[in-house]
Amino acid sequence: MKGFKTILGAIAVAAMLSVSFSASAQENANRDENGKINRGAYETNGFWSNWFIGLGGGVNTYWEKGQEGLNIGIAGEGFIGKWFTPCVGARLGYKGVTNRKPIEIPGNSNEKNQWFMHSVNADVLWNISNTIGGYKETRFWEFVPYFTSVFYDHVYSNEDGKYNNLEFAAGVGLLNDLRLHKHVDLYIQIQAVFARAAALSASPEMFLSIIPSATIGLMFNLGKSNWDRHSSITPVVIPVPFTTDQYNALKKRCEELEAENAALKDRIAQLEAENAKMKGLKDGHTYIYKDGDFIEVNCEGKKSGPGIVYFDIDKYTLSTREKAHLEYFAGDALNKDSKVVLVGSADKQTGTAAYNQKLTERRAETVKKLLIDKYGLSEDNIEIKAEGATNNLFDTPAKNRCVTITLK
């Protein structure tokens, strides 16, 4: 019993030292600008991130009620695990322990028999260093207690034969993780597993046995072995309180904008009403707008006066504006059977007579081509007269740079 108390005392001392060291090992890497410890939030790691494997060895013993002294044996272990958060992880491992102790076998109780125990253990890990002190990648010593569930295969033999006992057990442990490199750690582990005594001996009156062990080994961090914090949320900027004048000015501006918005809504309603009236208009019919309504008028028998389009100085192509004038005239006065005369003119203030003659021909041809291509008039129904600068009927040069369109 004295030896068992010694083991428990060692575990308690290791726990206190680990917490003390973790608390003193804080650096600015896990604190904010005000010196407060950051404890998250951290981005969820991917499936292949923060895995680790370990391999080690050490010593073990065995204790049950009434036992005198401890018989030390050898323990070997290996495991693989993953951290799901900086504070919580899990691992799956194998441990083999061997020892010598009296095994009470009916009919052969005085024999001392070598026994060997295989165990598969599943552990839930809790990193107290990261929980209390916040995650810090460069921390040297991390204190990780854990809960373990164990499946044992206890093998022992003597001159009477070989025996197996299978048993489930549970226990607790303390993993001290010392950082050597980003991907390599040294670990020191203390563990105590509680099992039914009947699983390890043939003494049915013994209910509980304790199997302590202490191991040391190397742990290798695989893949991405650190954690990223979520990006900081931009703090809300609280403005300096408004003065009375600023408040009144903003209030007035809001009222003005609300009035403008109401006026725009009224105008939209008006336009929608007008648009509704226009939906009933028929293509090819003539209407006049009077007192808010479109009134159809009969224009049959009416003949349109001459049309005219103007050209820029020394140009024989029409501007966009003049093309619109031509379109308006053609749509109102012409159809595909119309017969027209095109008279081209130039101003006499610029150019020679020969040049102006050629220019007026080109201007007339431009209008002719538009009437044919765009408005469907027959070429045979279009007559061209190029008069150069001889027919300056208007009082300014700009008016004389034109083509007139007259229906026959």
Image (cartoon, rainbow, N blue to C red):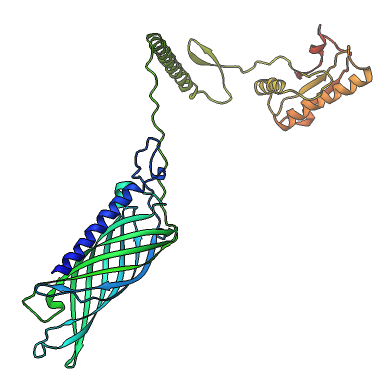
Position in image of residue 345 (x %, y %)? 84, 17
Q: Does residue 240 sit above or below 85 in this rendering?
A: above
Q: Quadrant of the C terminus?
A: top right
Residue lying furthest top: 395
Q: Quadrant of residue 386?
A: top right
Q: Quadrant of the N terminus?
A: bottom left
Q: Quadrant of residue 265?
A: top left
Q: Does residue 128 sit above or below 76 in this rendering?
A: above
Q: Quadrant of residue 41?
A: top left
Q: What's the residue at 16%, 65% (across, down)?
A: 5
Residue lying furthest left: 205
Question: In the picture provided, is 229 more to the left or to the right than 310?
Answer: left
Q: What's the residue at 11%, 84% (across, down)?
A: 104
Q: Does residue 378 sit above or below 68 in this rendering?
A: above
Position in image of residue 118 (x %, y %)? 26, 77
Q: Does residue 354 sit above or below 169 in this rendering?
A: above
Q: What's the residue at 70%, 31% (across, down)?
A: 374
Question: In the picture provided, is 384 more to the left or to the right than 126?
Answer: right
Q: What's the residue at 40%, 8% (across, down)?
A: 245
Position in image of residue 323 (x %, y %)? 71, 23
Q: How many numbered dots are placed on residues in this image?
A: 0
Position in image of residue 280 (x %, y %)? 48, 24
Question: In the picture provided, is 245 more to the left or to the right than 109?
Answer: right
Name the foreground residue: 359 vs 393. Answer: 359
